[in-house]
Image (cartoon, helix red, strand yellow):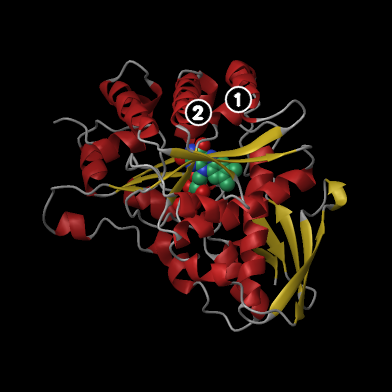
Amino acid sequence: MPIRRRAALALMGGGTVFAASALAGGFVATRTPEKALTAWKLAGGYAEPRRRALSYAILAPNPHNLQPWLVDLKDEDVVVLYRHQERKLPVTDPLERQLTIGMGCFLELMIIAATTTGHFVDLELFPNGDDGPVAIGRFREGATPDPLFAHVMNRRSCKEPFDLRPLPADKIGELTSMAEIISRPDRVDTLRDLTWKAWKTEAHTTHALKESVDLMRFGKAEIEANPDGIDLGGPFLEALMIAGIVTRDAQLDTQSYGFQEGLRIYRDMLMATPAYAVIKTDMNTRLDQIAAGRRWLRLNLATTSLGLALHPVSQALQEYPEMTAHYERAHAILAIPGQTVQMLGRLGFGPNVEQSPRWPLESRIVHG
Ligand SMILES: Cc1cc2nc3c(=O)[nH]c(=O)nc-3n(C[C@H](O)[C@H](O)[C@H](O)COP(=O)(O)O)c2cc1C
Protein backbone atom coordinates (compact mmCIF):
# COMPACT_ATOMS: atom_id res chain seq x y z
CA MET A 1 0.00 0.00 0.00
CA PRO A 2 1.55 3.35 -0.91
CA ILE A 3 2.03 5.69 1.99
CA ARG A 4 -0.41 8.52 1.63
CA ARG A 5 0.68 12.11 1.62
CA ARG A 6 -0.52 13.00 5.09
CA ALA A 7 0.93 9.87 6.56
CA ALA A 8 4.28 10.55 5.00
CA LEU A 9 4.27 14.10 6.29
CA ALA A 10 3.70 12.73 9.72
CA LEU A 11 6.53 10.27 9.32
CA MET A 12 8.83 13.16 8.64
CA GLY A 13 7.84 15.10 11.70
CA GLY A 14 5.23 17.38 10.28
CA GLY A 15 3.13 17.67 13.41
CA THR A 16 -0.56 17.06 13.92
CA VAL A 17 -1.91 14.64 11.39
CA PHE A 18 -5.31 13.13 11.48
CA ALA A 19 -5.09 11.11 8.29
CA ALA A 20 -8.20 11.42 6.18
CA SER A 21 -8.33 7.74 5.47
CA ALA A 22 -10.59 5.57 3.41
CA LEU A 23 -10.68 3.15 6.34
CA ALA A 24 -14.22 2.63 7.50
CA GLY A 25 -16.04 1.54 10.62
CA GLY A 26 -15.74 2.05 14.35
CA PHE A 27 -11.94 2.19 14.28
CA VAL A 28 -12.12 5.50 12.41
CA ALA A 29 -14.74 6.93 14.72
CA THR A 30 -12.70 6.22 17.85
CA ARG A 31 -9.26 7.46 16.81
CA THR A 32 -9.59 11.18 17.61
CA PRO A 33 -7.53 11.89 20.77
CA GLU A 34 -10.39 13.66 22.52
CA LYS A 35 -8.59 14.02 25.86
CA ALA A 36 -5.54 15.60 24.20
CA LEU A 37 -7.80 18.21 22.62
CA THR A 38 -9.79 19.03 25.76
CA ALA A 39 -7.79 22.19 26.41
CA TRP A 40 -9.31 23.70 23.27
CA LYS A 41 -12.81 22.93 24.54
CA LEU A 42 -12.10 24.36 28.00
CA ALA A 43 -10.58 27.60 26.69
CA GLY A 44 -12.52 30.54 28.06
CA GLY A 45 -14.37 28.44 30.60
CA TYR A 46 -12.79 30.01 33.68
CA ALA A 47 -14.30 32.86 35.67
CA GLU A 48 -11.06 34.19 37.15
CA PRO A 49 -9.49 36.57 34.57
CA ARG A 50 -5.91 35.23 34.74
CA ARG A 51 -6.99 31.61 34.39
CA ARG A 52 -9.32 32.56 31.57
CA ALA A 53 -6.53 34.37 29.69
CA LEU A 54 -4.13 31.49 30.36
CA SER A 55 -6.61 28.93 29.09
CA TYR A 56 -6.14 30.58 25.69
CA ALA A 57 -2.41 31.26 26.07
CA ILE A 58 -1.68 27.51 26.31
CA LEU A 59 -3.00 27.21 22.74
CA ALA A 60 -0.08 29.31 21.46
CA PRO A 61 2.23 28.02 18.73
CA ASN A 62 5.53 26.76 20.09
CA PRO A 63 8.45 24.70 18.78
CA HIS A 64 7.70 20.99 18.50
CA ASN A 65 4.63 21.69 20.61
CA LEU A 66 6.75 21.27 23.74
CA GLN A 67 4.59 23.74 25.71
CA PRO A 68 7.52 24.67 27.96
CA TRP A 69 5.56 27.13 30.08
CA LEU A 70 4.83 27.13 33.80
CA VAL A 71 2.90 29.83 35.63
CA ASP A 72 2.83 30.88 39.25
CA LEU A 73 -0.46 32.50 40.30
CA LYS A 74 0.09 32.86 44.02
CA ASP A 75 0.06 36.69 44.02
CA GLU A 76 -3.27 38.31 43.28
CA ASP A 77 -3.67 39.66 39.71
CA VAL A 78 -0.15 38.50 38.84
CA VAL A 79 1.10 35.80 36.46
CA VAL A 80 4.75 34.83 36.81
CA LEU A 81 5.83 32.89 33.75
CA TYR A 82 8.73 30.41 33.84
CA ARG A 83 10.36 28.19 31.24
CA HIS A 84 10.11 24.50 32.02
CA GLN A 85 13.69 23.37 32.53
CA GLU A 86 13.18 19.87 31.17
CA ARG A 87 11.31 20.84 28.00
CA LYS A 88 14.11 21.84 25.68
CA LEU A 89 15.54 21.09 22.23
CA PRO A 90 19.28 20.94 22.93
CA VAL A 91 20.27 19.84 19.41
CA THR A 92 18.16 22.02 17.15
CA ASP A 93 17.62 24.95 19.51
CA PRO A 94 20.88 25.06 21.49
CA LEU A 95 20.53 28.76 22.32
CA GLU A 96 16.86 28.35 23.29
CA ARG A 97 16.04 31.11 20.84
CA GLN A 98 13.05 29.31 19.39
CA LEU A 99 11.75 28.28 22.80
CA THR A 100 11.91 31.95 23.81
CA ILE A 101 9.99 32.94 20.68
CA GLY A 102 7.34 30.42 21.74
CA MET A 103 7.15 32.15 25.13
CA GLY A 104 6.57 35.41 23.27
CA CYS A 105 3.68 33.78 21.42
CA PHE A 106 2.26 32.62 24.77
CA LEU A 107 2.53 36.08 26.34
CA GLU A 108 0.90 37.83 23.39
CA LEU A 109 -1.96 35.36 23.37
CA MET A 110 -2.43 35.84 27.13
CA ILE A 111 -2.46 39.62 26.65
CA ILE A 112 -4.96 39.48 23.78
CA ALA A 113 -7.26 37.13 25.70
CA ALA A 114 -7.04 39.32 28.81
CA THR A 115 -8.48 42.27 26.87
CA THR A 116 -11.73 40.35 26.49
CA THR A 117 -12.34 40.62 30.25
CA GLY A 118 -11.25 44.27 30.12
CA HIS A 119 -7.71 43.70 31.40
CA PHE A 120 -4.39 45.14 30.38
CA VAL A 121 -1.34 43.12 31.31
CA ASP A 122 1.77 45.11 32.22
CA LEU A 123 4.78 42.96 31.42
CA GLU A 124 8.13 42.93 33.12
CA LEU A 125 10.41 40.71 31.04
CA PHE A 126 13.30 38.67 32.45
CA PRO A 127 13.39 40.62 35.75
CA ASN A 128 16.36 38.47 36.94
CA GLY A 129 18.08 38.03 33.59
CA ASP A 130 18.09 34.75 31.75
CA ASP A 131 17.89 32.52 34.83
CA GLY A 132 14.69 33.58 36.57
CA PRO A 133 11.17 34.08 35.31
CA VAL A 134 10.56 34.92 31.67
CA ALA A 135 7.97 37.51 32.63
CA ILE A 136 5.87 38.94 35.39
CA GLY A 137 2.48 39.98 34.08
CA ARG A 138 0.31 42.29 36.21
CA PHE A 139 -3.37 42.38 35.29
CA ARG A 140 -5.19 45.68 35.64
CA GLU A 141 -8.56 46.87 34.41
CA GLY A 142 -9.35 49.28 31.59
CA ALA A 143 -8.66 47.46 28.31
CA THR A 144 -10.97 47.12 25.35
CA PRO A 145 -11.16 43.80 23.47
CA ASP A 146 -8.51 43.16 20.83
CA PRO A 147 -10.23 42.27 17.52
CA LEU A 148 -7.60 39.60 16.78
CA PHE A 149 -9.08 37.54 19.62
CA ALA A 150 -11.84 36.44 17.24
CA HIS A 151 -9.33 34.21 15.42
CA VAL A 152 -7.66 32.46 18.36
CA MET A 153 -9.68 29.25 18.11
CA ASN A 154 -9.09 28.88 14.36
CA ARG A 155 -5.37 29.64 14.36
CA ARG A 156 -3.14 26.79 13.21
CA SER A 157 0.35 26.07 11.96
CA CYS A 158 -0.69 24.58 8.62
CA LYS A 159 1.73 21.80 7.66
CA GLU A 160 0.22 21.10 4.26
CA PRO A 161 0.81 21.96 0.58
CA PHE A 162 -0.64 25.36 -0.34
CA ASP A 163 -2.45 26.52 -3.44
CA LEU A 164 0.09 28.12 -5.79
CA ARG A 165 -2.12 31.00 -6.92
CA PRO A 166 -0.48 34.35 -6.10
CA LEU A 167 -1.61 36.13 -2.97
CA PRO A 168 -3.84 39.17 -3.59
CA ALA A 169 -2.02 42.44 -3.01
CA ASP A 170 -4.62 43.66 -0.52
CA LYS A 171 -4.07 40.61 1.70
CA ILE A 172 -0.30 41.10 1.56
CA GLY A 173 -0.87 44.77 2.43
CA GLU A 174 -2.73 43.76 5.61
CA LEU A 175 0.27 41.81 6.85
CA THR A 176 3.23 44.04 6.09
CA SER A 177 3.10 45.86 9.42
CA MET A 178 3.73 42.51 11.15
CA ALA A 179 6.23 40.80 8.86
CA GLU A 180 8.10 41.12 5.60
CA ILE A 181 6.08 39.28 2.98
CA ILE A 182 8.01 37.80 0.09
CA SER A 183 5.98 36.92 -3.00
CA ARG A 184 8.25 37.84 -5.91
CA PRO A 185 8.61 34.57 -7.86
CA ASP A 186 12.42 34.53 -8.07
CA ARG A 187 12.75 35.16 -4.33
CA VAL A 188 10.10 32.56 -3.55
CA ASP A 189 12.04 30.03 -5.65
CA THR A 190 15.22 30.80 -3.73
CA LEU A 191 13.45 30.26 -0.41
CA ARG A 192 11.86 27.01 -1.55
CA ASP A 193 15.33 25.76 -2.39
CA LEU A 194 16.75 26.98 0.94
CA THR A 195 14.01 25.43 3.07
CA TRP A 196 14.18 22.12 1.26
CA LYS A 197 17.97 21.82 1.49
CA ALA A 198 17.93 22.80 5.16
CA TRP A 199 15.17 20.31 5.89
CA LYS A 200 17.14 17.52 4.16
CA THR A 201 20.20 18.40 6.19
CA GLU A 202 18.20 18.10 9.40
CA ALA A 203 16.68 14.77 8.33
CA HIS A 204 20.16 13.39 7.63
CA THR A 205 21.79 14.70 10.80
CA THR A 206 21.32 11.74 13.12
CA HIS A 207 21.17 13.55 16.47
CA ALA A 208 18.82 16.22 15.06
CA LEU A 209 16.55 13.59 13.53
CA LYS A 210 16.57 11.63 16.79
CA GLU A 211 15.51 14.71 18.73
CA SER A 212 12.36 14.82 16.59
CA VAL A 213 11.75 11.09 16.58
CA ASP A 214 12.02 11.00 20.38
CA LEU A 215 9.20 13.55 20.46
CA MET A 216 6.92 11.59 18.15
CA ARG A 217 3.73 10.27 19.73
CA PHE A 218 2.62 7.14 17.91
CA GLY A 219 -1.13 6.73 17.90
CA LYS A 220 -4.01 7.78 20.09
CA ALA A 221 -2.82 6.15 23.34
CA GLU A 222 0.59 7.87 23.20
CA ILE A 223 -0.96 11.20 22.19
CA GLU A 224 -3.45 11.03 25.06
CA ALA A 225 -0.66 10.12 27.51
CA ASN A 226 1.63 12.92 26.25
CA PRO A 227 -0.37 15.61 24.45
CA ASP A 228 2.66 17.38 23.03
CA GLY A 229 5.53 16.83 20.58
CA ILE A 230 4.88 15.50 17.09
CA ASP A 231 1.61 13.64 17.18
CA LEU A 232 1.12 10.87 14.65
CA GLY A 233 -2.53 10.02 14.89
CA GLY A 234 -5.60 9.13 12.91
CA PRO A 235 -6.93 5.85 11.58
CA PHE A 236 -4.65 5.54 8.57
CA LEU A 237 -1.40 6.05 10.47
CA GLU A 238 -2.59 3.84 13.29
CA ALA A 239 -3.34 1.08 10.80
CA LEU A 240 0.28 1.40 9.59
CA MET A 241 1.45 1.21 13.18
CA ILE A 242 -0.52 -1.97 13.78
CA ALA A 243 1.02 -3.35 10.58
CA GLY A 244 4.48 -2.54 11.95
CA ILE A 245 5.28 -0.11 9.12
CA VAL A 246 5.26 3.06 11.18
CA THR A 247 7.56 2.51 14.14
CA ARG A 248 10.04 4.63 16.06
CA ASP A 249 12.95 2.59 14.69
CA ALA A 250 11.78 2.94 11.09
CA GLN A 251 11.70 6.70 11.50
CA LEU A 252 15.40 6.67 12.32
CA ASP A 253 16.27 4.53 9.30
CA THR A 254 16.97 6.89 6.41
CA GLN A 255 17.03 3.93 4.01
CA SER A 256 13.52 2.81 4.88
CA TYR A 257 10.69 3.16 2.40
CA GLY A 258 8.69 5.35 4.75
CA PHE A 259 11.59 7.75 5.26
CA GLN A 260 12.32 8.04 1.53
CA GLU A 261 8.69 8.47 0.62
CA GLY A 262 8.38 11.08 3.36
CA LEU A 263 11.28 13.03 1.89
CA ARG A 264 9.55 13.19 -1.46
CA ILE A 265 6.24 14.20 0.04
CA TYR A 266 7.80 16.82 2.32
CA ARG A 267 9.63 18.27 -0.65
CA ASP A 268 6.35 18.55 -2.56
CA MET A 269 4.84 20.38 0.40
CA LEU A 270 7.71 22.84 0.66
CA MET A 271 7.56 23.51 -3.06
CA ALA A 272 3.81 24.19 -2.84
CA THR A 273 4.46 27.63 -1.37
CA PRO A 274 3.48 30.88 -3.10
CA ALA A 275 4.87 33.31 -0.49
CA TYR A 276 6.83 33.61 2.74
CA ALA A 277 6.60 35.71 5.88
CA VAL A 278 9.79 36.79 7.61
CA ILE A 279 10.36 38.30 11.03
CA LYS A 280 13.82 39.59 11.84
CA THR A 281 15.35 41.73 14.54
CA ASP A 282 18.30 44.13 14.64
CA MET A 283 19.70 42.45 17.73
CA ASN A 284 19.20 38.99 19.15
CA THR A 285 18.61 39.47 22.87
CA ARG A 286 15.97 37.58 24.83
CA LEU A 287 13.82 40.70 24.58
CA ASP A 288 14.12 40.64 20.77
CA GLN A 289 13.13 36.96 20.73
CA ILE A 290 10.07 37.62 22.91
CA ALA A 291 9.13 40.53 20.64
CA ALA A 292 9.50 38.31 17.58
CA GLY A 293 7.20 35.69 19.14
CA ARG A 294 4.60 38.33 19.95
CA ARG A 295 4.68 39.53 16.36
CA TRP A 296 4.46 35.99 15.01
CA LEU A 297 1.37 35.29 17.09
CA ARG A 298 -0.33 38.44 15.82
CA LEU A 299 0.70 37.58 12.29
CA ASN A 300 -0.74 34.07 12.65
CA LEU A 301 -4.04 35.49 13.92
CA ALA A 302 -4.09 38.05 11.11
CA THR A 303 -3.43 35.39 8.45
CA THR A 304 -6.28 33.37 9.98
CA SER A 305 -8.57 36.39 9.71
CA LEU A 306 -7.68 36.70 6.01
CA GLY A 307 -8.26 33.03 5.25
CA LEU A 308 -4.54 32.42 4.76
CA ALA A 309 -2.44 29.58 6.11
CA LEU A 310 0.92 30.05 7.82
CA HIS A 311 3.55 27.40 8.52
CA PRO A 312 6.90 28.04 10.22
CA VAL A 313 9.86 26.45 8.45
CA SER A 314 12.67 26.97 10.90
CA GLN A 315 15.39 24.52 9.92
CA ALA A 316 17.62 27.04 8.09
CA LEU A 317 17.46 29.39 11.09
CA GLN A 318 18.77 26.88 13.60
CA GLU A 319 22.14 27.31 15.28
CA TYR A 320 23.86 23.91 15.20
CA PRO A 321 27.05 23.14 13.30
CA GLU A 322 25.58 20.96 10.53
CA MET A 323 23.15 23.78 9.67
CA THR A 324 25.72 26.58 9.45
CA ALA A 325 25.84 26.86 5.66
CA HIS A 326 22.04 27.12 5.40
CA TYR A 327 21.92 29.55 8.33
CA GLU A 328 24.42 31.80 6.60
CA ARG A 329 22.58 31.58 3.30
CA ALA A 330 19.25 32.40 5.00
CA HIS A 331 20.78 35.47 6.57
CA ALA A 332 22.48 36.54 3.33
CA ILE A 333 19.13 36.30 1.52
CA LEU A 334 16.82 37.72 4.16
CA ALA A 335 18.76 40.09 6.40
CA ILE A 336 21.45 42.72 6.46
CA PRO A 337 24.63 42.02 8.44
CA GLY A 338 23.93 42.07 12.16
CA GLN A 339 20.25 41.23 11.89
CA THR A 340 18.82 37.89 13.02
CA VAL A 341 16.06 36.14 11.13
CA GLN A 342 13.82 34.95 13.95
CA MET A 343 10.95 33.39 11.98
CA LEU A 344 10.46 32.21 8.42
CA GLY A 345 7.08 30.85 7.43
CA ARG A 346 5.31 29.54 4.38
CA LEU A 347 2.28 31.64 3.53
CA GLY A 348 -0.61 30.87 1.19
CA PHE A 349 -4.06 29.42 0.81
CA GLY A 350 -4.10 26.08 2.62
CA PRO A 351 -6.61 23.48 3.75
CA ASN A 352 -8.30 23.47 7.13
CA VAL A 353 -6.34 21.37 9.59
CA GLU A 354 -7.10 19.96 13.03
CA GLN A 355 -6.17 21.45 16.36
CA SER A 356 -2.96 20.14 17.90
CA PRO A 357 -2.89 18.52 21.36
CA ARG A 358 -2.30 20.46 24.54
CA TRP A 359 -1.57 19.66 28.18
CA PRO A 360 -4.36 20.90 30.47
CA LEU A 361 -3.94 24.35 32.00
CA GLU A 362 -3.87 22.88 35.50
CA SER A 363 -0.71 20.91 34.65
CA ARG A 364 1.08 24.18 33.90
CA ILE A 365 0.25 25.99 37.15
CA VAL A 366 2.94 25.64 39.81
CA HIS A 367 1.26 27.68 42.57
CA GLY A 368 -2.31 28.55 42.17
C1 LIG B 1 9.58 29.30 17.13
C2 LIG B 1 8.76 28.27 16.42
C3 LIG B 1 9.35 27.46 15.45
C4 LIG B 1 8.60 26.51 14.76
N1 LIG B 1 9.19 25.77 13.77
C5 LIG B 1 8.47 24.88 13.07
C6 LIG B 1 9.04 24.14 12.00
O1 LIG B 1 10.21 24.30 11.66
N2 LIG B 1 8.27 23.24 11.33
C7 LIG B 1 6.96 23.05 11.66
O2 LIG B 1 6.29 22.22 11.03
N3 LIG B 1 6.38 23.74 12.67
C8 LIG B 1 7.10 24.65 13.37
N4 LIG B 1 6.51 25.38 14.37
C9 LIG B 1 5.06 25.19 14.65
C10 LIG B 1 4.83 24.24 15.80
O3 LIG B 1 5.15 22.92 15.43
C11 LIG B 1 3.37 24.36 16.23
O4 LIG B 1 3.16 25.65 16.75
C12 LIG B 1 2.96 23.33 17.26
O5 LIG B 1 3.06 22.03 16.75
C13 LIG B 1 1.52 23.56 17.72
O6 LIG B 1 0.65 23.54 16.62
P1 LIG B 1 -0.31 24.78 16.29
O7 LIG B 1 0.54 25.98 16.04
O8 LIG B 1 -1.07 24.35 15.05
O9 LIG B 1 -1.22 24.96 17.47
C14 LIG B 1 7.24 26.36 15.07
C15 LIG B 1 6.63 27.18 16.04
C16 LIG B 1 7.39 28.13 16.70
C17 LIG B 1 6.73 29.02 17.72
Between residue 302 and residue 364, name the one nearer to us: 302
Q: Is residue 226 visible?
A: no
To which residue does mark 2 refer?
187
Q: What secondary structure is found at the residue carrying circle 1?
A: helix
Q: What secondary structure is found at the residue carrying circle 2?
A: helix
| Residue drawn at the location 21% of the way across and 32% of the way down | 3
Between residue 228 and residue 58, name the one nearer to us: 58
Horizontal side, residue 126 vs residue 228: left or right: right
Q: Which mark is residue 333?
A: 1
Q: Residues within 10 Å of mark 2 (few under 14, many from 20)?
A: some
Between residue 173 and residue 45, name the one nearer to us: 173
Q: Residues within 10 Å of mark 1 (few under 14, many from 20)?
A: few
Q: Looking at the picture, which amino acid does disc 1 mark?
A: Ile
Residue 69 picture location, percent across and down: 65, 55
Horizontal side, residue 174 vs residue 32: left or right: right
Q: Is mark 2 within 8 Å of ligand 1?
A: no
Residue 282 picture location, percent across and down: 77, 37
Residue 86 picture location, percent across and down: 65, 44
Q: How many numbered marks does the figure carry?
A: 2
Cα gap from disc 1 to disc 2, whole angstroms: 9 Å
Instruction: Tell me whether the residue at label 1 lies in contact with that at label 2, contact meaning CB atoms closer than 8 angstroms.
Output: yes
